[in-house]
Image: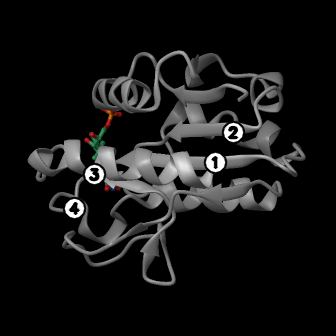
Amino acid sequence: MDRIGLFYSFRSHKTSKIAEKIAGQLGTDLVEAVDAETIAENDFLRFNRMILGVPTWFDGELPNYWDEFVPALRELDLSGKKAAIFGLADQVGYPENFGDAVGIMARLLQSCRAEVVGHTSSEGYTFEGSKALYDNKFLGLILDQENQARLTAERILQWTEQLKKEF
Ligand SMILES: Cc1cc2nc3c(=O)[nH]c(=O)nc-3n(C[C@H](O)[C@H](O)[C@H](O)COP(=O)(O)O)c2cc1C
């Protein structure tokens, strides 16, 4: 099986810890970590399966390091590739923009013709609005370390088992 590209900011606090847990569940030999802070087009194109760590920042926006890559990303043809997104978010602090960045990134990847897998149930979260929602499900995995840290390990386990089937 070809390797899975795991993209996240190596400088991020919470996202990088979660990414390491996800890699551990999938098998570190199967996963290649790539720093989203220094990403280039070719990093995307050399993987057929990728996982992106995309926390929400700035009241419903992508963090800077992802935002800077968006113009280049828009030009890519990701046909035949599968992508899954996880995102840290805060449902109490930002209930109207809960995990928005997951939805922003999912739609960007879809517009580049990637297939976005790893959708999850929105049950068990309390919020008012989220761009990550589609058909009542999240377009990726949303983790809330501020308010629901004790649910994170189980959510990661369920999601990685799901990805093993969907990838
Ligand atoms: C300035 C700032 C803005 C944020 N905006 C949002 C937001 O709009 N929606 C949300 O769900 N979480 C928001 N958050 C919460 C972050 O997503 C959360 O703290 C996350 O764990 C950050 O992950 P990181 O440290 O790996 O970047 C915000 C956090 C900060 C500090």
Please tell me whether mark 2 sits on a helix, a strand or a loop.
strand
Q: Residues within 10 Å of mark 4 (few under 14, many from 20)?
A: many
Find the distance from the CA under tag 1 to the CA under tag 3.
18 Å
Residue at (38% x, 31% y) in the render? 25
Q: Earlier in the sequence, mark 1 or mark 3?
A: 3
Contact (Cβ within 8 Å) of mark 1 with mark 4: no
Residue at left 18%, top 43%? 145
Give the mark toward the camera: 1 or 3. Answer: 1
**How far apart are the alpha carbons under marks 2 and 3?**
20 Å
SS at mark 4 in the image = loop
In the picture of the structure, the residue carrying the numbered disc 4 is: 91
Indicate the amino acid at tag 1: Phe
Relative to 2, say whether 128 is above or below: below
Disc 1 secondary structure class: loop
Q: Earlier in the sequence, mark 1 or mark 4?
A: 4
Judge left or right: residue 84 versus residue 145. right
Where is ligand 1, by quadrant? Answer: top left
Inter-mark Cα distance, 1 to 4: 28 Å
Q: Which mark is residue 49?
A: 2
- Place of residue 116 in the rendered image (x, y in percent of width and height, measured from the top left): 65, 58
Alpha carbon of mark 4 to alpha carbon of mark 2: how far? Answer: 29 Å
Give me the C-alpha separation between circle 2 and circle 1: 7 Å
Residue bearing the label numbered 3: 155
Q: Is mark 4 within 8 Å of ligand 1?
A: yes
Q: Nearer the viewer, mark 2 or mark 1?
A: 1
Q: Position of residue 39 (x, y in %)?
A: 68, 22
